[in-house]
């Protein structure tokens, strides 16, 4: 009986997460309890944590902010609005060629064979632009190979995952890292406070 209730709760959490946009556990809880008032915040946290560990959801970790959860577990990149905090997925169709070039650039300068990546862009979303918000744009890292217009529009933080710093040159190719779950990639953000709170999230 308890097991049946647990799997019902897990299913409800999963379905709710799919309807939402990179929510925090607390936001998932607020939605889930509309359908299941007896569910606790702890249950939602625990289920999301175990799903992230299993790799059935992606956990996005941000500095000084609660983790967010994403039902899309394939490798994809995120754009965060520095005004309202909303997180967008990039369109998968733009990625392969860009990613390939970026990988080669990283490999050329570090000797590390890239196996996975975590990319976060930051800027001002269309809605916040309409509402007149502006944000100071800084090129942080990894924008050297990007076209100038792109570099000016976004702040990109590039992280080469999987021990890039410690892998000796020439041995990275021998590391068997394929099939690694994206759930274990921590997507870190140094979200700048500049420009935030100009627009309240509705
Ligand atoms: Zn925004
Ligand atoms: Zn996403």
Image (tube, helix red, strand yellow):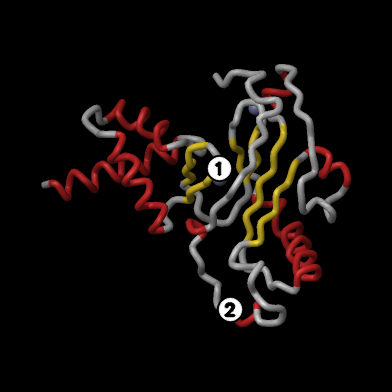
As drawn, which residue projects farthest toward the left?
1
Residue 84, position as x, y percentages in the image: 61, 26
Q: Are marks 1 and 2 in contact (CB under 8 Å)?
A: no
| Percent position of residue 59, x then y | 48, 48
Q: Position of residue 9 (x, y in %)?
A: 26, 41
Helix, strand or loop at label 1? It is strand
Relative to residue 114, is residue 18 drawn left or right? left
Q: Does the Cβ of the disc 1 residue fall within 8 Å of ligand 2?
A: no
Q: Nearer the viewer, mark 1 or mark 2?
A: 1
Q: Position of residue 162 (x, y in %)?
A: 59, 66
Q: Quadrant of ligand 1?
A: top right
Q: Height in image: 116 above or below 21?
A: below
**Residue 112 relative to residue 41: left or right:** right
Q: Residues within 10 Å of mark 1 (few under 14, many from 20)?
A: some
Q: Which residue is mark 2?
A: 175
Viewer-proximal residue among 161 and 2: 161
Choose between 105 and 98: the one closer to the eye.
105
> Residue 54 bears which disc, if any?
none
Which residue matches tag 1?
62
Report the side of 7 relative to 56 (left or right).
left
For the point 38% across and 58% down, the residue is: 54
Residue drawn at x 37%, y 29% is 31
Task: Judge left or right: residue 56 versus residue 3.
Answer: right
């Amino acid at each position: 009986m308890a097991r049946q209730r647990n799997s019902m709760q897990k299913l409800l959490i999963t379905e709710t997460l799919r309807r939402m946009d990179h929510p925090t556990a607390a936001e998932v809880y607020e939605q889930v309890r509309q359908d299941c008032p007896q569910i606790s915040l702890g249950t939602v946290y625990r289920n999301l944590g175990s799903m992230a560990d299993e790799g059935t959801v992606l956990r996005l970790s941000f500095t000084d902010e609660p983790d967010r959860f994403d039902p899309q577990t394939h490798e994809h990149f995120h754009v965060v609005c520095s005004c309202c905090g909303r997180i967008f997925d990039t369109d998968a169709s733009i990625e392969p060629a860009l990613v390939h070039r970026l990988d080669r650039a990283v490999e050329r300068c570090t000797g590390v064979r890239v196996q996975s990546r975590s990319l976060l862009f930051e800027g001002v979303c269309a809605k916040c632009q309409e509402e007149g918000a502006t944000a100071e744009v800084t090129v942080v890292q990894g924008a050297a190979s990007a076209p100038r217009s792109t570099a000016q529009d976004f702040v990109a933080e590039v992280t080469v995952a999987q021990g890039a710093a410690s892998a000796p040159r020439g041995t990275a190719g021998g590391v068997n890292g394929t099939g690694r779950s994206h759930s274990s990639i921590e997507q870190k953000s140094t979200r700048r406070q500049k420009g935030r709170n100009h627009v309240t999230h509705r």
